[in-house]
Amino acid sequence: MLEFSEVDAIMLRKNSEQIDVFNHMIFERLIPKDHLLVKIDSTVDFSFVYDKIKDKYSKIGRGSKDPTMMLKILLLEYLYRLSDVEVAKRIKTDIAFRWFLKLSIDDPVPDDTTISHFRIKRLGEEDFEDFFNEIVKQCIKKDLIKTNRYLIDSTDVDANVNYPSDKKLIRNAYRNVIKQIDRFDENLSKEYLEKFESEIDEEYKNNEKVSAKKHYEIVEKNLSDLYIKTYDELQNNSKYEDAYGICYDIIDKFKNDKGDRIVSVVDPDARIAHKSPGKIKKGYKNHIIIDEDSEIILASEQTPFNVNDHKKFKDLIKKVDTNLELKPKEISADKAYGTLDNRAFLKDNEITSNIAFYRESSKEKTSFGLDAFEIAEDVSYVICPNGIKSTTYKDTQENGKEYRRFKIDPKICDECILKEQCFSKTKAGKIKVRSKFLMVPKRYDVIKMDLNRVETDDFKKAYNKRYKIERRFATMVLNHGLRRCRYVRLHRAKIHIILANTVCNIIRMVNLTFHPKPATS
């Protein structure tokens, strides 16, 4: 049991573990022994909360609500898909909830504003990350987690906003700027709102349709004027600076056709991307790494949706190593993660890769690919499909990657019987023979090793186990509200996603404890 000073005990209030005979009889009679909350209470040790959170509380002031109770309330929300208002009402009437929170029948219940304050003001993203890690560490202590094989994948999480058209987006952004100006200069805000609306109206009088581009041009002109008129306020007013900056970014990304475009003024951190051809997704991503044996989530990363999956691959593995001191023997992931950089990282860290390769196009080729050449282990030479060896190369870089550019003499190629498959033809139908260049990654040893790996039965068995990580996502979407964020902005979306991940782990921990899998020989 953690000990606190007398002042800490007053400020950091803790609900009593002891209950009177009357309450004990009620709880005993009404709460089934196999109730989920009873199982969680006997499986998870929440005592770590006090030590983790005590520095968040002042030494003076009113006594706080029990922080463990408050965290449990947040977990109840995700266990039963309840809002702050709904969980506060449920605690009043649900005897199992009261028992789980160490509240007697007569104890007052925190209201929804207290719950919201605890989550938003009292804690930060790093605190929820700490709580998540503590649960995983308890799984490790119970020997639930192995280090045989880990799985990595991501799923989309919708932002809690609607997505307007380009025209409506810039109008909303500009009006947000005007709203902030109104707080320090009503006359200026009125002037520039009327000016903007009259300019838009004039365009519609002269044209049947007004393009989004024209809307952006009008806003940009007004924004430039306002920059000069409100320069001092922009330096000192953070809310106005934020609204102005969002509006400016929307214009800049639209004008320059940048891919990282803001799609909502309400949630300017949300992003849009194509998950597959014709399937657009907007919002955020939950990147996770799980233990294949237990299906416990070991670490997670949250990003806007347009962040490519492969960019979080190494971060997740390093996070598990740093936070939990665990390193797997193997990693399985979808082929989207199979960049050269990621494959090299696995090999250099002595982790076996179970990542497939994209299939080559079925269209007729006019040139042999890398797989048609014999390439030295140390990439010191290549041998073409006709047996010609080349040691002539130049080291170069392309898109930040290191390559070795081999060259084969065009005189040799001109006499080669395979030249029709190596070179394209001119409009006249003649084969255009020139110097043959072959770009080989300097870490081709990784590609060669993984190409051999994907042909093995061990790889196929491992790759077919990826459904387990999809099962974790499905559980969180169906049971714990992962599909759509409750809150806006990335820092709050992270809290939503981490809580869903944490609850998913707690349920999994309970299931493995009460229904252990049979040992395999």
Image: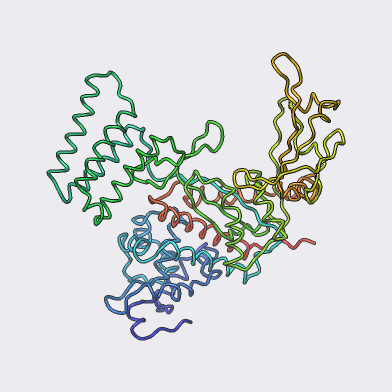
Q: Which residue is at a point 54% across and 46% down the rendered structure image?
A: 155
Q: Position of residue 294 (x, y in %)?
A: 65, 59
Q: Position of residue 95 (x, y in %)?
A: 41, 65
Residue at the extreme top of the image, as rendered: 428
Q: Can residue 33 be seen in this view?
A: no
Q: Nearer the viewer, residue 131 or 406?
A: 406
Is 362 on the left-hand or right-hand side of 224? right
Image quadrant of residue 113? bottom left
Vertical comparison of 316 with 170: above or below: below
Q: Is residue 69 visible?
A: yes
Vertical comparison of 403 with 494: above or below: above
Is 34 on the left-hand or right-hand side of 109? right
Vertical comparison of 431 with 315: above or below: above
Residue at the extreme left of the image, as rendered: 187
Q: Where is residue 5 in the image (x, y as percent from the top left)?
A: 38, 85
Q: Nearer the viewer, residue 281 or 436?
A: 436
Residue at the extreme bottom of the image, as rendered: 6
- Figure quadrant of the C terminus: bottom right
Vertical comparison of 477 with 117: above or below: above
Is 254 on the left-hand or right-hand side of 208? right
Image quadrant of residue 213? top left
For the rendered model, the colour scheme is rainbow
Is 491 on the left-hand or right-hand side of 144? left
How many labels, in total? 0
Q: Which residue is at a point 19% across and 46% down the rendered structure image?
A: 229
Q: Position of residue 253 (x, y in %)?
A: 40, 39
